Image: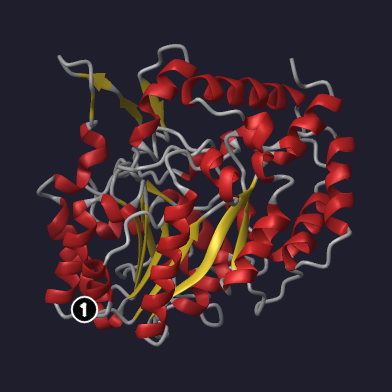
Amino acid sequence: MFCKTVWHGLYILPHGDIRLCSIATNSKNELDGNSARDKDGNLMNILTHSIKDIMNSDKHCSVRSLNQSDPKAWSSHCDCCKIREQVTNHDRTHKNKSRRIYLNELISTDDTATEENHIGKASEAGEIDWYPASLDIRFGNLCNQKCIMCSPEFSNLWYDDWHEWTGGRKQFTNGRPVTLIKNEHNKWVAPVELQWYDDPRWWPKFEEMSPHLKHIYVTGGEPMVVPAHDVMLDKLIEGGYAANIVLEYDTNATVVNDKLAERWKHFKMVDIRVSMDAIEDQYELIRSGGKWEKFVKNIEKLKQYEKESNRQIRVSALTTCFQMATAHTILEAEEWCKSIGVHFHIRFLEGAAHHRVLHLPVAAREELIEIYSNSDSEKAKMITQFLISNRTSTISDPKHVHTFVKFMNFLDERRGTNWKTVLPQLADMLTRYNFMP
């Protein structure tokens, strides 16, 4: 299935390496983590490879070649959008449409390659000869929260807990190992790989791409706490490119200020999704470091920016990941979003494995189907469809549920929380199915 991410996009991981797509399937070993590799099999990095070489990585060419030879076929890399389009009944107008459909509509690429005319636009091997119109970027892993489903790759605040949880490991990886080191004061040193954007090779490459960009997706870490994010916006404004570019964010909205809003006014549109996951004490448990009261105030501030800009700056959604911790909390979160007039968006978490709902026993998943099938809410219907379509899935492995309980108990000790009290329905379910010690 044609997707502008693959034909027109470039995705930079927090350590500068390149992947096919930010939501491409990463739980199947045979897919190589969707890591982009060059013709010699080397991992591609924004500092070591040219822009046009990156656009023709092995993964990009493979998917484009399939798009041309069998336009209706889904690549095995694209399960996330495939599932999304299934649970939304292939409705292209659905508020929770797939990212493939969203970006096909959002990214302006003239007639270079579109869903209607892409066949023959690439070589038979899938190679192209144009610059990206869409940049998907993560400026390292600097963050001010340490969400339970996150990792040190995407949040530097995870270092201590991850080090303890893994029994003293000092390396993590998403294709290329990153090593954690402490200084003479016993403080973690930011790995150089995660500061790739400070390398003098980066900004000339960004400036090479800038005239062609129509869309930039920024997440993190937390994008709004990284100085390089502001530098990027300033360069686009000063270069005269901003008015042609849609900015898209996934942010925790902890850093919202008027100075940033003034920068945003220069862009064609600013589309902001705010990560929420749950409300009140459940929010604070899942998004460790976040404070619910401050979150609510910052959403109100963003809504004010939206009003003042006539929706040129807009809060398009508050988002949640459907995972073990939110398995029973979705409806309450959806109702809260309705009460403040902001769309609620749901994603289906794929990893880490111990957070994935599909590892629950069949009978437990049937309980969730019963809960959500009795609701008329839009998200309930999506969850019901998701669970029903995976009834026969062979992925279920109870060991991951045991790991989840052990992991949450570990975080309780480290963070002074009590997950069983905050998530009583989940605790009750896991007790009844003999997962609790």
Q: Is residue 132 visible?
A: yes
Q: How is the image coloured?
A: secondary structure
Name the residue furthest left: 200
Q: Look at the image and tell me in which quarter the N terminus lies.
A: bottom right
Asked which secondary structure carries label 1, the reply is loop
**Residue 121 position in % (x across, y down):** 45, 75
Q: Residue at x 63, y 20 (%)?
A: 406
Residue at 38% over, 69% down = 301
Answer with the quarter of the image where residue 376 lies.
bottom right
The amino acid sitting under disc 1 is Tyr
Is the residue 18 above or below the residue 418 in the image?
below
Q: For this view, does 436 lie left or right of residue 366?
A: left
Residue 171 vs residue 418: left or right?
Answer: left
Quadrant location of residue 113?
A: bottom left
Q: Position of residue 231 (x, y in %)?
A: 16, 60
Front residue (pair 329, 83):
329
Tell me if 402 is positioned left or right of 185 in this view: right
Question: Which residue is at the front of the view, 140 or 343?
Answer: 343
Q: Measured along the vertical axis of the image, is residue 232 above or below residue 432? A: below
Q: Is residue 170 left or right of residue 74?
A: left
Q: From the top left corner, tell me how far across and down residue 6 is, in percent.
A: 46, 62
Residue at x-position 21% and y-position 43%? 196
According to the picture, the residue beneath numbered tag 1 turns out to be: 241
